[in-house]
Amino acid sequence: MNGNLIELAPSILSADFAHLAEQVERAAAGGGTVVHVDVMDGHFVPNITIGPPVVKCLRQATRLPLDCHLMIEDPDLYIPEFAEAGADWISVHQEACRHLNRTLHLIKQHNCRAGVVINPATPVETLAEVLEIVDYVLVMSVNPGFGGQKFIPATLHKMRKLAEIRAERRYSYRIEVDGGVGMDTVADVVRAGAEILVAGNAVFGKGDAKVNAAALLEAAKAANLQRV
Ligand code: DX5
Ligand code: ZN
């Protein structure tokens, strides 16, 4: 268990897609250690992004783990293809999975880390029966679909709760947060227990991704030291 290890996962959703490899490299140079890849199908969320071919190209462009966040219906149909393309971590939404246990096992069978995601309106309690088997839990702190949205503070208590449950039951999942994480919110999410910090706009929105990533990570680590 890496309870105290803070990692930054730059989300390429806000990157310049024409220069993806360079952008990922800049963010990695600033301390990003996981590449967050947002996959949207226009059904589960009102936006369409990228699929396995882009994951395959990214696989050639970076050695960092690729964290594929599937915001799609019927994820079981596509998990093998994402794994084949080079995904290291695959997360699925609780809200999109009729047979969540089966889907999480499917991810593991493809030798990927398995994550489960909850939308802002979904309580942690809905995960009670899968927390033991997941490698990470992703708490959405915006409604999924777009980068650059405003952080929803009412989601913080879910990160706290997940940290409590993990300690009580001696589970080993890591806690990831996604949406509206920036210089103004990073300390709050870290203090609440988030360990893998997804950031799109704050890293790639404006300026240099290396400088932005380094500043964000530094603020996150400082907040982690203040945790009691
Ligand atoms: C939103 C995506 C996020 C998005 C976060 O649906 O899941 O990963 O890229 O973007 P920011 O950090 O800009 O809120
Ligand atoms: Zn995401």
Image (cartoon, rainbow, N blue to C red):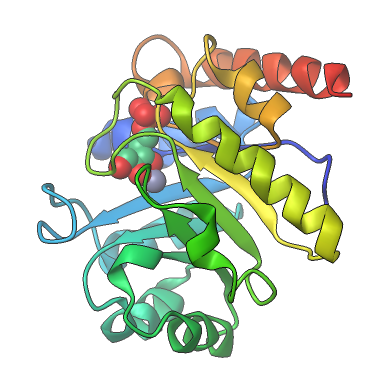
Q: What residue is shown at x 66% (from left), y 66% (from top)? A: 135
Horizontally, residue 175 falls left or right of residue 94, namely right
Q: Position of residue 57 (x, y in %)?
A: 36, 60
Q: 188 or 165: which is nearer to us? A: 165
Q: 142 or 211: which is nearer to us? A: 142
Task: For residue 115, say whether it is visible.
Answer: no
Q: Position of residue 197 (x, y in %)?
A: 58, 36
Horizontally, residue 101 falls left or right of residue 132, namely left
Q: Quadrant of the C terminus?
A: top right
Q: Position of residue 53 (x, y in %)?
A: 27, 66
Does 46 sit above or below residue 203?
Answer: below
Task: For residue 71, say whether it is visible.
Answer: yes
Q: Quadrant of the N terminus?
A: bottom right
Does 85 sit above or below residue 156?
Answer: below
Horizontally, residue 162 falls left or right of residue 170, namely left
Q: How many marks?
A: 0
Q: Position of residue 124 (x, y in %)?
A: 53, 54
Horizontally, residue 167 falls left or right of residue 190, namely right
Does 57 sit above or below residue 19?
Answer: below
Q: Quadrant of residue 130?
A: bottom right
Q: 177 or 217: which is nearer to us? A: 177
Q: What residue is shown at x 70% (from left), y 21% (from top)? A: 220
Q: What residue is shown at x 32% (from left), y 64% (from top)? A: 95
